[in-house]
Image (tube, rainbow, N blue to C red):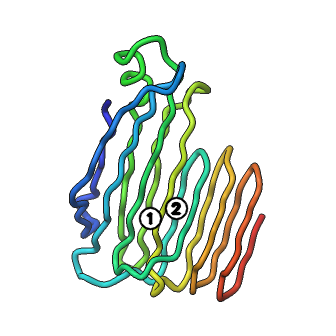
Amino acid sequence: MRFALYISLTAALLCAQASLQMTREGPYYVFTMSAPVVNVNGRVPAQLRVVTRGNVLLRGSTSEQVVYKLVQRVKAHSEAEARRLSSGGVTATTPPANMMTLTVIAPPNGDISNDLEVSVPRQVVITIVQAQGGSVEAYDLDGSVQMAASLGIRCDRIHANVDGR
């Protein structure tokens, strides 16, 4: 599996302790990757932006790190084919304006589904999510949430503004 965790040289981010697992579920190969994303300046970003093709689940967290878990299901005849088809990855960048962006790079293939779960620190003021071809769920957040999803939005226990499209 060529899950690549790309780190922009201009972004001051470290991704530590990334873990990758592969299992087989019927005709699907399931790849699971999870890692904390740490801002080098040591502070929680004021804004978090998530861009993906697939489903997104946001959960409020008492941690001071953004942590993601990406589950990718690939319908393939062999493990080698599954690894070839799922050659996407996750990029994390922080422009100068204290906003972290997580982007799931998914190959344009109809036999792959992405489910991204993100633990959002309570100090994040606003989270912006764009889920192309998927849904967004958000729970237990102290900051505002802006969501754009193709297949639906569900949220509860958001303690600030919610904007869903």
Residue 101 badge: 1
User: Helix, strand, or loop for circle 1?
Assistant: strand
The percent position of residue 65, horizontal first and vertical second, equals 34, 74
Q: Which residue is mark 2?
A: 50
In this view, 24 is above or below 68: above
Residue under the point 50% across and 58% down: 117
Residue under the point 70% across and 61% down: 148
**Residue nearer the viewer, 61 or 95:** 61
Which amino acid is tagged 1?
Thr
97 vs 4, left or right, is right
128 vs 164, left or right, is left
Q: Label 2 to label 1, Cα distance in Å?
A: 6 Å
Residue 8 occupies which quadrant of the picture?
bottom left
In this view, 76 is above or below 22: above
The percent position of residue 149, horizontal first and vertical second, equals 71, 56
Q: Are marks 2 and 1 in contact (CB under 8 Å)?
A: yes
105 vs 132, left or right, is left
User: Helix, strand, or loop for circle 2?
Assistant: strand
**Residue nearer the viewer, 135 or 148:** 135
Residue under the point 66% across and 88% down: 160
